[in-house]
Structures are given as structure tokens and as C-alpha cells.
Image (tube, grey):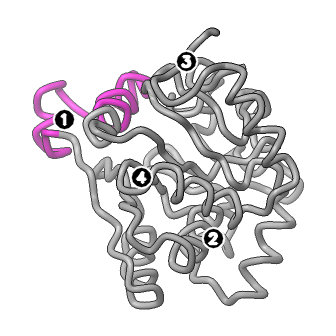
Amino acid sequence: MATVTESFSVDELADINATLAEATPDEILRWGVERFGSRLTMATAFGPEGCILIHMLSQVGPKVRIFNLDTGYQFAETLELRDRLADRYGIEVEMVRAEKSTAEYEREHGGPVYTSNSDQCCYDRKIVPLRRALVGYEAWITAIRADQSADRAYSKIIGWDSKFSLVKINPLLKWTRRDVWAFIVANKIPYNPLHDVGYPSVGCFPCTKAVGAGQDERAGRWAGQAKTECGLHSLDSSQL
């Protein structure tokens, strides 16, 4: 039997996805908590979906380690949201940073790398720190939705992440943007105020722009570039 990890075979992953096909996000999270325990972690960029998962984990898995990839270029509003979530749920999100500060990094490269090579900047300040943050874990939770991008549409609720070599759990995969905001409003979940002023998706401030009415929610990410992903959730990070 083909094995994708020490924990699962290909057939077992298929069976798990079939079992969880109609499960609610909190049921999927509970499955992950029960299956992996202290070997489960979650990455969040403090988007609305991530805030929902923090809300749910506060109920089904409050001891799960949650971290943010702090590139050094995040909006002040994003960092303030971390504090508001901690006040609401008692969960301190760990900040995982690159080994070099933004000043050191820019000095080394003769200026901001995001202006000349955004892929390299994302790799150095997100992918490399993420690899370090995932060491010792068997599974990670993400807040992606299938309708956000073509790459994400290929993801599974429970998949094998070949890029980072661990199980990838996507509890909100089948939700829509409407589902997300209905849940946030109904549960009064803290969220980034930038969402109220034209920023449906928030990344690093140099590469995130406000979008116009009717534009795709990720149109403001790396605006003016063909780039739509930082690399964390591109096709080769999920089992198809």
C-alpha cells in the first residue's frame, strides 16, 4: 500500500476525506486535535478565516500552538489584531520571524527585495521561517478556502503537504466568503479593520493594495503582478 507519511497511506487519506466530507469546520478541527495532539500546529496571517479558526480552537483545542509568520512588513492593524484576539480568547499567537530583521535584510540586498523579486522576499521571510516553525510537527492547520484561487481549489480537507512533509488540515476549504463573514458577524469575532476599507485580503503592506468593488478578493495581493500566492499554498504544497 502506497504511503505518504508514517501516519497515513494514500487509501487512508482518501477514507478520512470521505468520512469528513460533510463535517463542520469545528468537527474537522476536533478530529485533528484528537488525532495529532501536541504534534498539531496552526499558521495564521490573521485573515478573517484564521480568526474564525482561533475562535473554534479556543473551544475544541485551546492548547494547539498557533503562530504567525511575521515578515517585518505587516500592517500595524494586523499586529494589533493579535492583541485583540489574545484578549478575547486567551490565546497568544507566536510570532515566527526570519533570522534577519528587515533592516538587515534590505541592507544585505541593497534595498527592499519585494520591489525587485517578490518571490525571493516571500521565500526568505515566509517559506524558510515556516519550515523552521513546522519542525517536530506531524500536521498543520491552514485557513484556506477552495474558492480563493485556482491552486487552492485542488486542496483536500485532509491532505499530504509534500512541500513541508506533513499532513495539511483545511477546515474551511468548502466555505465561501459569504459563509466566513456571516460567521464572524454572528459570533462577534475580532477582525482586521482594513477589511472595512477595501482590503478583503491583507498581506504585507508594501505588496497589498485596496481593491475596487466587484474585484476578486485577492486582487490586491501583489497588485500589478501575475503572482497570486506567496508559495505556502501553491499546487505543489497539496496532494492533488
Q: Which residue is mark 2?
A: 52
Label 3 close to label 4 by CB (< 8 Å): no
Residue at 56 percent across and 73 percent down: it is 60
Query: Going from the N terminus, do you reach mark 3 or mark 1 first?
Result: 3
Most prominent secondary structure in the magenta stretch? helix
Label 1 close to label 2 by CB (< 8 Å): no
Disc 2 to disc 4, how far (Cα)? 15 Å
Amino acid bearing label 4: Thr
The boundaries of the magenta stretch are 99-128
Amino acid bearing label 2: Ile
Residue at 68 percent across and 75 percent down: it is 196
Give yes or no for residue 44 being in the magenta stretch.
Answer: no
Residue at 76 percent across and 28 percent down: it is 14
Amino acid bearing label 3: Val
Towards the viewer: 145 or 76: 145
* Placement of 114 over or under 145, stated as above or below: above
- Where residue 165 appears, as percent x and y from the top left, is 44, 24
Is residue 205 in view from this perspective?
Answer: no
**Label 1: element kind:** helix
Q: Which residue is mark 1?
A: 106
Q: Tell me, for residue 41, which label it has, or none.
A: 4
From the image, which quarter does the N terminus lie in? Answer: top right
Residue at 81 percent across and 45 percent down: it is 19
Other-residue count near label 2 (Cα within 10 Å), few / some / many at <14 / 14–19 / ≥20: many
